[in-house]
Amino acid sequence: MNPAEKARIQDVPQMHHLINSFAGKDDMLARSLSELYENLRDYFVIRNDDRVIACAALHLTWSDLAEIRAVAVAEDYQRQGIGGQLVAACLEEARTIGIATVFCLTYRPAFFEKFGLAQVDRMELPRKVWTECYRCPKFPDCEEVALILNLEVLP
């Protein structure tokens, strides 16, 4: 198994299948192929040989704010620390590029709390983070939990 690395164009079909397999179970928001191609630079993947077994994205929403999104690990590779490697890669990139605050919206808050993210009321998040929520079939009655982390940014 390889470490987390930036996604490549040829990874997109596998990322699409992985993410949407979880979206089909209402575990996360579905992503279209066009959205994945447009935001490819946001994504990290972990591969086992040529198979993408996990992915996650750090999506910039403003000069001081980014979202960790689309964290997905193939079911046969879960509970091995792979998701944690991806979140760590996202947090490291956020620090490196100077992002002060990272947030996520999730049904699995305990997973993100292990990395220092703390639960907040969703209404405390800036309005610009709601862009994707409007296209979600569960909006406005979503049960996702908002978490946030203020980072110590590298000089």
Image: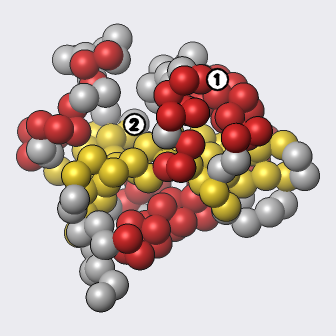
* Sequence-earlier tag: 2 or 1: 1
Residue pictured at 27% horizontal, 25% vertical = 133
Residue, far top: 137
Q: Residues within 10 Å of mark 1 (few under 14, many from 20)?
A: some
Q: Residue at x 28, y 80 (%)?
A: 152
Circle on res. 107:
2
Q: Position of residue 131 (x, y in %)?
A: 25, 29
Residue at (21%, 62%) from the top-left corner? 64
Q: Amino acid at mark 1?
A: Ser
Q: Are marks 2 and 1 in contact (CB under 8 Å)?
A: no
Q: Quadrant of the N terminus?
A: bottom right
Distance from Cα at disc 2 to Cα at disc 1:
16 Å
Coordinates of residue 111 in the picture (x, y in percent): 46, 54
Percent across and percent down for residue 121 are 13, 44
Residue furthest right as drawn: 49
Q: Which residue bears the numbered disc 1?
A: 21
Vertical comparison of 101 with 120: above or below: below
